[in-house]
Image: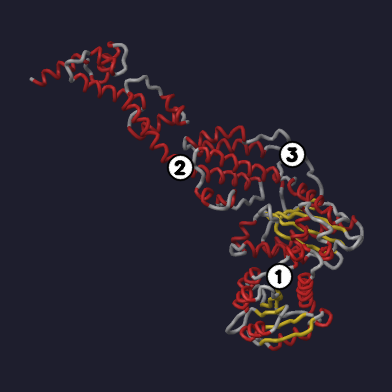
Amino acid sequence: MVKVLIIDDEEPLREAINILGDWKGLGVEQVLEATDGKVGLALLREHKIDLALIDMKMPELGGRELLQIIEHEFPELLTIVISGFNDFEYTRQAIRSKVVDYLLKPVNRADLNAALRKGIDMLEAKRKKESDFISRNITLNMSLPKLKEKMYLSILERSFKNRSNEAFLPLIGADTPGNYFAAGVLRVLNLEQVRKERFHGDRDLLHFAVTNVIHENGDGSFQSFSFASPKTEREFVAIFTMIGGYGEDAAFLSVHQLKKVVTTLKELFGIHAVGGIGQPYKDVIDLAQSYEQAKVSLDGMDLLNLKGAVVRDGPPQRPQAKDNPSLTGRMPLIRNALENGNTSHARSVLAEFTRKWKSAEYFSIGEADRIVQEFIILLNDIAMDLDAVPERLKNGKDKGLRGLGLGGDFSSFGEFELLLTQILDCYAAGIGKSLAGDRGSVLENIKAYIDNHYFENIKISMFTDKYFLSREYLMKLFKGQYGYGIHEYVQKVRMDKAKDLLNDPQLKIQDISEMLGYKDKNYFSKAFRNYYDCSPSEYRILLTEGDK
C-alpha cells in the first residue's frame, strides 16, 4: 500500500487534488495534507511517506528549499512538483532533484493521475525483488524514464539480456506480441545557440525541453520516448512503439511523428533540427538495427542542400564519393605555415580543400562530422609535437570542440567552413604563443653559436635543419631581432675579431686569416677592405701612426 502527502498552502488546490486523484485505483492507502513546507517536513519526519506532491511557491519554506532538504534527508522519497507556468528557476530545481513529474497549475484530472501512476509504477518497480538486476542496479532515486533509457541503451549497444531484464520488459511494451518498435535520431543543428539564447546556458533544461516535446507527440496506440545521446553531443535518440497494427503503419507514423517534433521544436524554441528514422521491427532487440539505419539516414543528408525541417527514413540518396580530397596530405603545408607564424597561409590551404568539397555534387553531414574530428586530431598531433597544445585543452577535462571553447554548430556548408577555420585559429594561437618564446631562445642559440664558432664554415642550413624552420623565415626572424642577416652577422663577428687580432703585431696577417676561417690571405684582405675601406696592412699602419 502507498502513502501520499500533499504539501500546499492553498486549501482549494489540496481539495482539488484530493477529489481528482484516483486513489483507490492507484492503490493509495492514505492521503495526508500539509498546509506549508514546515508542516510538510514535520510530517515527512513523522510518517513513512512514499510519494509527495509539493507546491513550489509557499511562504517560509518554499518548494525549492524543501526539495533540497528532501534530497539529503529522504533520498528514497518520490516527488511530484506543482508550479505556475514557465517558471524557469522552479523547473531547473525540479530537474536537479530528479522529480517524478512536473505539473502546471491549474491541475487537471488526466495529468494528475498520469503523474501519480508514473510515481506508483516507479514505487512498484523499486519494491520488486525478483531479479538480481533490480537489487544491484536500481537505486531508490532512479526515475522510471531513466530506467527505460538504460534499457533502451543496452538494446542499442547489443548488450541487453532478456532473461536478467525480464521483469522490466512491460515498461517498454516488449512483453506484448504484435507491437512494433522503431528508432529515430534527432540532431539539433544550432544547439549551442539556443542553449545560450533560449535556455540561459542550461544544457539540462534544453535536454528536458527536447525530450518532453518528443514524449508528448504520441497517443495511446503510438508512443514516443527519447533521451539525449550519451555519445554524440547534439543528438537525441527517439524510440517509437506502436501497439499492434501493421509494420507499414508503424513506419509511416514514425516519420510523421518525428517531422511533427522537428516542426514543434522550431516553433516553440527556435531549434533547428533534422532527423533520421530506421525501419520498424516486431522484436525489441532489433531496435539496434533500426537505430543504425536511422544514423545512416541522418549522416547521409546532403549538407550542400540542407534546407528546412528534414526527416529521412532511408539510405543516402547518393553515396559519398570515394575520391573526396583529404586534409591529411596537406597537413605538412599547414604545419609549415603555423610554425612560420603565417596563419593566413594556413587558412588558404584549408580554403583550397573546402572549395573542392563545396564544388562536389554531394557532401554529407556524416562526412563533415568525420572531417571536424580528423582535423582536430591532426592539429593536436602537430601541437603536441611542437609542445604547443592550447592551454584549455592541456589543463581542462573536456577535449575536442568543447575543450577548444567552440560550440560545433553547423546547419549549412558555410557554417561548417567557419567551424574548421575557428578550429585552425585556436591551434594557430596556441602554437604561435608557444613558439614565440621558443623562437627567442632559438635566435639566442644561433647568435651564441656564431659568436663562438665564427671561424667555421657556417651555413644557414645548419640551423634550418636543427630547428625545423624555413630558410626565409629564419633569416627574417634573425634580422628582425639583431638588425643583421645571418651571413652579415658572421661577417661582422669575423671583422670585429680581425681588428682585435691586428692589434697584436706578433701575429702575421696569414695567421689571422686562418684564425678567422679564411683559407686564402688575399680573400681575407679583400673582405677586410670591403668592410673597413682599407686593407689589414693599412689598418696596422694607421694603428702605429695613432700610437705616435
Classify mark 3: helix, strand or loop.
loop
**Vertical arrangement, residue 108 with respect to residue 383, above or below:** below
**Which residue is outermost to the left?**
548
Estimate the spatial distance between the alpha carbons at disc 3 and disc 1, rounded to whole Å.
48 Å
Helix, strand or loop under label 2? helix
Q: CA distance from mark 1 to mark 2?
A: 51 Å
- 7 left or right of 225? left
Tell me the kind of residue under disc 2: Ser
Q: Are the residues at dot 3 and dot 1 in contact (C-beta closer than 8 Å)?
A: no
Q: Position of residue 279 (x, y in %)?
A: 84, 52
| Position of residue 457 measured from the top left corner of the image (x, y, whole percent) | 37, 19
> As rendered, which of 293 and 25 lies closer to the eye?
25
Closer mark to the observer between disc 2 and disc 3: 2
Q: Nearer the viewer, residue 21 or 265?
A: 21
Which label belongs to residue 434? 2
Q: Which residue is mark 3?
A: 320
Across and down, in percent, residue 402 comes to 58, 52
The C terminus lies in quadrant: top left
Q: Amino acid at mark 3?
A: Gln
The residue wearing badge 1 is 140
Q: Are marks 1 and 2 in contact (CB under 8 Å)?
A: no
Query: Which residue lies at the image location 71% right of the left edge and 85% below the top edge?
Result: 13
* Residue 168 falls in image quadrant: bottom right
Tell me the residue at 60%/47% (across/down): 419
Q: Is residue 421 left or right of residue 237?
A: left
The spot of residue 154 in percent (x, y) is 76, 56
- 14 versus 190 height, above or below: below
| Element under disc 1 | loop
**Res. 240 mark:** none
Identify the mark nearer the N-term, 1 or 2: 1
